[in-house]
C-alpha cells in the first residue's frame, strides 16, 4: 500500500485500465486530477466546451471500441457534458465521465461554495447506466474498476464517477485495483441449435445488424455468406458488413423499401438493435419470424417481439449459429442485389440534393476512413443511404437522443484515437455553430480534420416541418457567418466549394493538411 492523494488514486486507476487520453477542461476543483496525468502517461486534450469533450469521448469509443474518458470540473461544467452523456446512453456507447464533487462534509443546505450543486450524482444518474460518488480512497479505485467492468460486461453505456474535493487532496494509504475479470453473456446452445436449424430451412433468410454487433463483424459476415442472406444494418451498424459486399443491402432503414424488405424475409435474425423509431421512422416492421439476439435481456421485447429471443454477446451467438448450421448454402446473392437496388433507388431519390457531393466525398476517402456526421439533412437524407461505409464504426452518427453539434468534436476524438487514419466530419451550418469552437482545438493539437459544412441558412429540417404543418417558417432562418474567415481565425483553412469536382479536390487537399479545414458547400440555391 502507498500513500496517495485521491487525485493520484483516480489517475493511477485510469492508467491501469489502459486510459491514454482524456478530454476535459481544467478548473479550480479538478487541479489535483490534472496534476498526475502526465506522470501516469495520460495525454490531456482540451476542448473549448465540455459538451464537445463529451462528444469527443463518444467518438473515441465508437472508433476504437474502448471507453472514452472525459474529465470535467464541478457544477456547470458537469451539466455542460450531460447532453453528450445522454447521447452516449441512447446509442449504447461506453464512456466514463469523471468530476470532482462537493466535500464529504459539505452541509446539505449549502453554503455558497463555488459551483455548488445539490446533487451531481443524482443529475448524472439520469443520463448514465452507473453513477457513483466515492467517499474514501479505497472506494475511489474500486469504483473506477467497477465502472470499466460494467462497460465491458453488458450493454455498453456511459458511467459517472465523482470524487469529493477534500478526498482529491487528502492522502491515504491505498492499493490500486487492477481491472476486474469480465465475462460477457453467452448463448444457450439449445436455443442456438433451434435458431440455426430455422435459418437453414428458411427460403428467404435475412440479417439485421445493429450497433450491438460492431464487435462481431467477422462472425456476422461469415454467417451471412454461409446462409447467402441479405444484410441490412441500422445507422449505428453501418459498415459492419462492407457496403460493397454482394450481400449488403444498406443502412437507410427509415425508407419504406427497408420495411418492405424486412417483411419479405421468412426468417429475420436481428442482432444488437432496438428496432427504434429513430431508425424506422414510420415504426418498426413486422418480420414474419424473428430471431433476436441482444446482450441486454430487457431489450429483447422492446418494439418487436421475437419468436426466439437469445440473450448473448453478439460474437458468441453469431459464431455459435455458424457452427451449428446443418448445411451451408452459397446462394441468394442475386436476391441481395435486387433488394439493394430497391433501397438504393429510394435513397438516391430522397437524397438527390446531396448525391453529387456524396459521390465526390466517396471518391476521395479510403475504405477505413471514419465519417462523423451531425444531425443534418445532408447526413440522414444524403450520407446514410448514399455514402458507403466499409468498416465497423466507420460512420458515427448521434441517433436516439438526436443532438446537434456532435460531428466536429466526435471527429476530433476519432482522429486522436486513430492517428494516421483519415477522419472527416459532415455537418450543417446550424449544427456547426453548436461546436464550431472545436476547430480551435484541432488547430492547437495539429490534428488533420476536414469538415464539410452544408449551408442551408439555419435549421432546414425544422423549416420544412413548419411548412408541412401549415405555417410560415419562424425562428429558423439564420444569417450565416463568414465561415471561411471563421475557420482562418481559429487557425484552420476555409474555402467555399464551387461544385462536386471542386469538393473532391479540396477534400483531398484537406486530408493532407495539418489542422482543420472547413469546406463550405452552399446548397441554398438547390432543391
Image: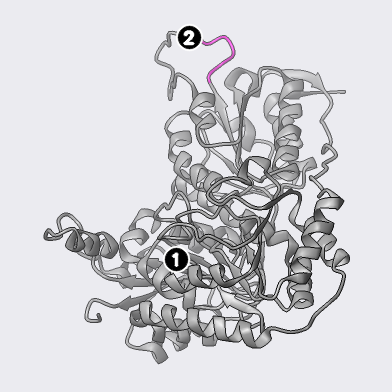
What residue is rendered at 22% in x and 81% in y?
A: 525
Q: Which residue is mark 1?
A: 254
Disc 2 target residue: 108
The spot of residue 308 in percent (x, y) is 70, 52
Examine the image and state in which quarter residue 388 appears.
Answer: bottom right
Residue 318 seen by the camera:
no
**Chief secondary structure of the magenta span?**
loop
Q: In what quadrant of the picture does the C terminus appear?
A: bottom left
Say the numbered circle drawn on residue 97.
none
Question: Viewed as shown, does residue 89 lie left or right of 247?
Answer: left
In the rendered image, the vertical position of residue 362 relative to residue 460, given as above or below: below
- Looking at the image, which is closer to me, 213 or 322? 322
- What are the residue bounds of the magenta stretch? 102-106
The spot of residue 346 in percent (x, y) is: 42, 79
Q: Are marks 1 and 2 in contact (CB under 8 Å)?
A: no
Which image quarter is the N terminus in?
top right
Image coordinates for residue 274, horizontal then vertical, percent: 56, 52
Can residue 27 be seen here? Answer: yes
Tell whether 363 sits left or right of 474. Answer: right
Q: Secondary structure at mark 1?
A: loop
Residue 56 lies, with reference to residue 247, above or below; the image says above
Q: Going 55% across and 24% down the picture, which residue do you hit?
A: 101
Distance between mark 1 and mark 2 Cα atoms: 49 Å
Q: Position of residue 444 (x, y in %)?
A: 51, 60
Give yes or no for residue 64 being in the magenta stretch. Answer: no
Tag nearer the camera, 1 or 2: 1
Foreground residue among 277 and 422: 277
Report crowding for label 1: few under 14, some 14 to 19, many 20 or more residues within 10 A (C-alpha).
many
> Mark 2: which secondary structure?
loop
User: Residue most toward the left?
Assistant: 472
Amino acid at each position: 500500500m502507498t500513500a496517495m492523494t485521491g487525485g493520484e488514486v483516480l489517475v493511477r486507476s485510469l492508467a491501469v485500465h489502459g486510459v491514454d487520453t482524456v478530454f476535459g477542461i481544467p478548473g479550480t476543483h479538478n487541479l489535483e486530477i490534472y496534476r498526475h496525468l502526465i506522470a501516469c502517461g495520460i495525454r490531456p486534450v482540451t476542448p473549448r466546451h465540455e459538451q464537445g469533450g463529451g462528444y469527443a469521448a463518444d467518438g473515441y469509443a465508437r472508433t476504437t471500441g474502448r471507453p472514452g474518458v472525459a474529465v470535467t470540473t464541478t457544477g456547470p461544467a458537469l451539466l455542460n457534458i450531460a447532453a453528450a452523456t445522454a447521447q452516449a446512453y441512447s446509442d449504447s456507447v461506453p464512456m466514463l465521465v469523471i468530476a470532482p464533487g462537493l466535500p464529504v462534509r459539505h452541509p446539505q443546505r449549502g453554503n455558497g461554495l463555488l459551483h455548488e450543486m445539490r446533487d451531481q450524482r443524482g443529475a448524472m444518474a439520469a443520463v448514465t447506466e452507473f453513477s457513483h460518488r466515492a467517499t474514501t480512497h479505497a472506494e475511489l479505485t474500486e469504483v473506477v474498476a467497477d465502472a470499466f467492468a460494467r462497460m465491458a460486461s453488458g450493454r455498453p453505456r456511459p458511467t459517472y464517477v465523482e470524487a469529493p474535493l477534500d478526498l482529491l487532496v487528502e492522502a491515504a494509504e491505498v492499493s490500486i485495483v487492477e481491472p476486474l475479470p469480465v465475462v460477457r453473456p453467452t448463448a444457450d446452445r439449445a436455443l442456438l441449435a433451434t435458431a440455426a436449424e430455422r435459418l437453414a430451412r428458411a427460403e428467404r433468410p435475412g440479417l439485421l445488424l445493429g450497433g450491438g454487433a460492431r464487435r462481431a463483424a467477422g462472425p456476422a459476415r461469415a454467417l451471412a455468406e454461409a446462409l447467402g442472406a441479405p444484410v441490412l444494418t441500422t445507422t449505428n451498424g453501418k459498415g459492419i458488413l462492407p457496403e460493397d459486399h454482394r450481400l449488403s443491402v444498406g443502412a437507410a432503414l427509415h425508407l419504406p423499401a427497408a420495411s418492405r424488405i424486412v417483411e419479405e424475409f421468412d426468417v429475420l435474425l436481428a442482432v444488437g438493435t432496438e428496432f427504434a423509431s429513430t431508425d424506422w421512422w414510420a415504426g418498426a416492421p413486422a418480420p414474419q419470424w424473428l430471431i433476436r439476439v441482444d446482450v441486454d435481456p430487457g431489450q429483447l421485447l422492446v418494439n418487436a417481439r421475437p419468436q426466439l429471443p437469445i440473450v448473448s454477446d453478439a460474437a458468441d451467438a453469431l459464431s455459435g449459429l455458424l457452427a451449428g448450421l446443418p448445411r451451408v448454402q452459397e446462394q441468394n446473392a442475386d436476391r441481395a442485389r435486387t433488394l439493394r437496388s430497391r433501397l438504393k433507388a429510394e435513397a438516391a431519390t430522397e437524397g438527390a440534393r446531396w448525391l453529387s457531393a456524396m459521390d465526390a466525398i466517396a471518391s476521395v476517402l479510403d475504405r477505413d476512413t471514419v465519417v462523423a456526421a451531425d444531425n443534418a439533412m445532408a447526413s440522414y437524407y444524403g450520407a446514410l443511404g448514399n455514402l458507403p461505409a466499409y468498416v465497423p464504426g466507420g460512420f458515427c452518427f448521434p441517433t436516439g437522443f438526436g443532438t446537434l453539434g456532435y460531428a466536429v468534436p466526435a471527429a476530433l476524438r476519432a482522429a486522436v484515437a486513430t492517428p494516421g487514419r483519415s477522419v472527416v466530419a459532415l455537418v450543417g451550418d446550424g449544427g456547426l455553430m453548436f461546436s464550431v469552437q472545436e476547430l480551435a482545438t484541432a488547430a492547437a493539437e495539429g490534428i488533420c480534420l476536414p469538415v464539410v459544412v452544408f449551408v442551408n441558412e439555419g435549421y432546414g429540417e425544422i423549416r420544412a416541418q413548419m411548412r408541412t404543418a401549415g405555417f410560415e417558417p419562424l425562428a429558423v432562418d439564420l444569417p450565416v457567418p463568414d465561415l471561411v474567415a471563421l475557420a482562418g481565425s481559429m487557425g484552420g483553412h476555409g474555402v467555399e466549394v464551387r461544385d462536386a469536382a471542386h469538393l473532391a479536390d479540396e477534400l483531398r487537399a484537406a486530408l493532407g493538411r495539418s489542422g482543420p479545414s472547413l469546406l463550405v458547400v452552399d446548397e441554398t440555391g438547390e432543391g
